[in-house]
């Protein structure tokens, strides 16, 4: 139960609900959040904007 | 969170994006489009016969089957420079690539189906020169990005319609792999989406191009729609031949290439529904007369060159490899009869 609660807090921090990560700030948290934003931007680029009739896929 | 930390996070995320762009750029060197471009560029230099056109021609012409069907031991070298999922601008660029590389005054065969060569009058009531492509350039993916990779000044002429602001954006856009190469990631996502979407459903017909059912949109919705499309073109006062195609043909002729306009094979269903209509016969006759007059080109009807039997057709207009064998053999036989001198050494003027 404690693990689940801890995981929920981490996810909330990643999702922007919390300002600070569980256990307080550490220098690597800022790097990790920067990486996370980059990954989110890449995922958005991969999944957004496709036409509904994506005919040719063998590029 | 103070401002410095925020900026640090933004910088890190931009670094991740830059790395992703680098990976995309490196991966793009091995993409199908880049591999095809390199292959066409190499083969065009020694080719005596060049196939140009859309995906219909790209799927139908097999240089190996063509060479095997040629009588004698010295068949003319050929290259398939047709390009699918592209606008006429990219076909013009491909023709220019062939012109630059060719040394043998090859015969160029421009394969087409339905209305690929003729102008849709209603969508362009008064086309100002230079005419824009029907879709905005920032939506282009895959083969349509050819204009960002070669002859970009010519491509920009059509893509941006003379807008200075758009031209600047066009020049920047081509250096951002996340924009230019996004089809490579989209393709992977789409494959995954199709696998998940087909779970529990009966298998549809798929091939190298994708799902056969998707390609039904390339054909007219109905016989009436097809006849009306023919009639609109025949009754229009302006250009009959699509202006970019006209430019393509004129540039081929100016480079001393002989030109054959070839009506590509179509399935029996497509022929009986659409090509049997009197409006299509009139469209065909006018197109044949126009290309003969403007470009001194021959017009060949190849719509019945591939029999409609199992294993030959992917959809109504694209053939499978067995159909490509049939088509290429027939093309070789027709060329032997019409141009027996093809393949003999000729020096370009």
Image (cartoon, rainbow, N blue to C red):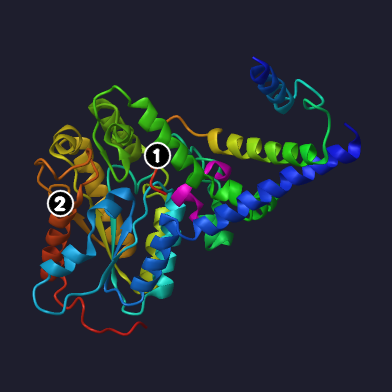
Identify the image quadrant of the C terminus of chain B.
bottom left
> Does residue B104 appear in the picture of this structure?
yes
Mark 1 Cα shell of 10 Å, populated few (<14), some (14-19), many (≥20):
some
Cβ atoms under marks 1 and 2 closer than 8 Å: no
Mark 2 Cα shell of 10 Å, populated few (<14), some (14-19), many (≥20):
some
Q: Quadrant of residue B279?
A: top left
Q: Would residue B330 be found to the left or right of residue A41 on screen? A: left
Q: Quadrant of residue B70?
A: bottom left
Residue name at image x 60 percent, y 47 percent: B178
Residue A51: within the magenta? no
Q: What subunit carries mark 1?
A: B
Position in image of residue B1 (x %, y %): 87, 31
3D distance between C-alphas at marks 1 and 2 = 33 Å
Q: Identify the residue under disc 2.
A: B322
Relative depth, front residue between A29 and B168: A29
Q: Would residue B132 be found to the left or right of residue B314 on screen? A: right
Position in image of residue B170 (x %, y %): 63, 51
Task: In the rendered structure, find residue B120 and report the number of the disc placed on it.
Answer: 1
Residue sitting at the far top: A1
Position in image of residue A49 (x %, y %): 55, 33
Q: What subunit carries mark 2?
A: B
Residue B140: within the magenta? yes
Task: In the rendered structure, find residue A23 and report the number of the disc placed on it.
Answer: none
- Start-end of magenta stretch: B137-146
Relative depth, front residue between B39 and B272: B39
Q: Is residue B63 above or below residue B226?
A: below
Secondary structure, magenta segment, majority class: helix
Q: Secondary structure at mark 2?
A: helix
């Amino acid at each position: 139960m404690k693990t689940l609660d801890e995981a929920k807090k981490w996810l909330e921090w990643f999702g922007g609900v919390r300002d600070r990560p569980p256990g307080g700030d550490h220098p690597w948290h800022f790097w990790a959040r920067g990486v996370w934003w980059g990954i989110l931007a890449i995922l958005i680029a991969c999944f957004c904007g496709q036409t509904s009739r994506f005919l040719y896929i063998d590029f | 969170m103070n401002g410095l930390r925020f900026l640090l996070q933004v910088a890190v995320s931009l670094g991740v994006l830059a790395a992703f762009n680098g990976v995309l750029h490196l991966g793009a060197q091995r993409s199908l489009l880049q591999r095809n471009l390199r292959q066409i560029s190499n083969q065009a230099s020694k080719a005596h016969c060049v196939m140009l056109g859309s995906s219909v021609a790209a799927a139908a012409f097999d240089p190996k089957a063509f060479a095997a069907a040629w009588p004698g031991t010295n068949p003319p070298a050929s290259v398939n420079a047709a390009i699918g999922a592209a606008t006429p601008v990219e076909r013009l660029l491909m023709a220019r690539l062939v012109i630059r590389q060719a040394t043998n005054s090859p015969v160029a065969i421009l394969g087409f189906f339905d209305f690929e060569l003729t102008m849709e009058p209603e969508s362009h009531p008064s086309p100002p020169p230079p005419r824009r492509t029907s879709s905005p350039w920032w939506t282009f993916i895959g083969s349509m990005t050819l204009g960002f990779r070669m002859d970009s000044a010519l491509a920009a002429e059509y893509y941006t319609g003379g807008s200075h602001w758009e031209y600047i954006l066009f020049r920047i856009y081509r250096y951002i792999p996340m924009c230019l190469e996004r089809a490579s990631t989209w393709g992977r996502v789409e494959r995954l989406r199709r696998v998940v979407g087909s779970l529990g459903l009966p298998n549809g017909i798929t091939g190298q191009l994708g799902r056969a059912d998707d390609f039904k949109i390339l054909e007219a919705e109905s016989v009436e729609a097809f006849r009306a499309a023919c009639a609109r073109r025949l009754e229009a006062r302006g250009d009959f031949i699509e202006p970019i195609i006209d430019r393509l043909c004129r540039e081929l002729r100016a480079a001393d290439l002989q030109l054959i306009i070839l009506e590509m094979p179509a399935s029996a269903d497509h022929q009986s529904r659409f090509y049997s209509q009197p409006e299509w016969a009139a469209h065909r006759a006018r197109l044949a007369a126009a290309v003969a007059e403007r470009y001194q080109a021959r017009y060949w009807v190849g719509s019945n060159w591939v029999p409609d039997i199992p294993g030959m057709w992917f959809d109504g207009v694209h053939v499978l490899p067995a159909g490509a064998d049939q088509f290429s053999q027939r093309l070789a036989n027709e060329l032997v009869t019409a141009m027996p001198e093809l393949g003999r050494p000729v020096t370009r003027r």
